[in-house]
Amino acid sequence: MQTGSNELMRDINTRLILETLIQNVSISRADIAKKLGLTRATVSAITEQLKQQDLILEDGSSASGQGRKAVLYRLHREHAFHLCINLSWDGLTIMCADLLGQHRQVYEYPAAQDPGTILDTVCDAVQDALDRYDNRGILARISIAVHGTVYRNQITFCPYSPYENIPFADTLEARFHVPVLLENEANLCAIGEQACTFPAGSMIFVSVHSGIGIGIMFDGKLFHGFTGKAGEFGHTIVERDGRPCPCGNHGCLEQYASEQAVLKEYRDRQNSPGLGFQDFISACLAEDPAAMDILNSFESYMAIAINNLLNTFNPEVLILNSRIINRMPWRLDHIRGRITGRTCSQLPLFASGLQEQAALLGGISLCTIDYLGLHSLDLSRYSL
């Protein structure tokens, strides 16, 4: 029992030291010991082991103080790298980055719509990205951002893409010999924003794409729900007996306020099915009456949705990620202006700082957390 207890304490201390190294550009062993309340002998033994594993490096010495200068250490971020795939309905976007989300490169590929070729298409895209990425470290993890629900590392609901029940994790693990982590796209966006731009312990991230999902953070940790379906906010009903939705209900929010719904409405109004998202944005910028009417409707529905989220969760921060707002950031004030309830008087509403790279950076962060064994730690304390 004593041996087991010692090993457990060593594992916990190792995680704490790694977390401290992530939070600091470089730091001495004495300062690590002081911050964590550990003995210098414990910190010295663990840092020596981490050096042997090539996870940390010496990084010069401190210039302050008298006598012998203290050696500084930093996380060896180039030791390994991760790959994250944003698996959307209309394409694949892949990011490769080191352990701290730096030295990152992004590659884009067309999506495969035929279920029989999807796995080959994804594997070929991953191999191409690996061939192009100029990092000498080892590939440590692969993560996949899914625009749908994930349970036990499998896609269980993906209404706008043919990805349900396809064995992505098993196939990619067999091909590339590393663990593969699947996670909901909005959840990864929340991780990315929390690690890189908004270090808040309580956060709601609203992701507006083909559907509408939210990432929910409590005390710095993701909330998944009982079977991974927490955050399917696009399937909350805003219109009684409204438009049919692939989820089986009628009047769901994403049938009125998702990018897909907005674009469909604009195409129908213009009687032109070939119009794209940029055509809608350009029409809004030109103040085309039909486009502006659709934009105002989008903002109205988003205000209702955000008001409901604020009153339900009372988060420290609520972040909205939508290409509509990203391309026209001043329109966020129009949404704010529609939220007037007394309980929302202090409105913690912000536009995404990472925008289209939020899920990718969240995937890289998740990979690092898994690779270093930091599962139980508060994500809001990281600074990638």
Image: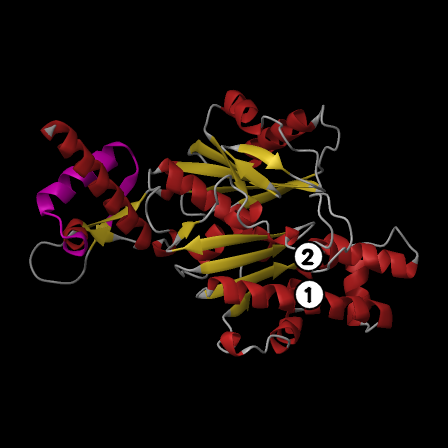
Give the crowd class for mark 1: few <14, some 14-19, many >=20 residues within 10 Å: some
Cβ–Cβ under 8 Å for marks 2 and 1: yes
- In x, y percent, where is residue 343? 50, 75
Quarter holding residue 172? top right
Visible residue check, residue 58: no
What's the residue at 44%, 54% (across, down)?
A: 217
Magenta stretch, overall SS:
helix
Q: Residue furthest left?
A: 67
What's the residue at 71%, 36% (across, down)?
A: 111
Q: Is residue 274 left or right of residue 249?
A: right
Q: Which span is picked out in magenta? A: 34-59
Give the crowd class for mark 2: few <14, some 14-19, many >=20 residues within 10 Å: many
Please state which amino acid type lies under the numbered disc 1: Tyr
Q: How many numbered discs, if any?
A: 2
Q: 331 or 177: which is nearer to us?
A: 331
In the rendered image, which residue does mark 2 sit on? 253
What's the residue at 44%, 39% (across, down)?
A: 367
Please state which amino acid type lies under the numbered disc 2: Leu
Q: Is-magenta flag for residue 134?
A: no
What's the residue at 38%, 36% (across, down)?
A: 371
* Secondary structure of the residue carrying numbered label 1: helix
Q: Residue furthest right?
A: 271
In the rendered image, which residue does mark 1 sit on? 301
Q: 2 or 140: which is nearer to us?
A: 2
Visible residue check, residue 154: yes
Q: Is-magenta flag for residue 48?
A: yes
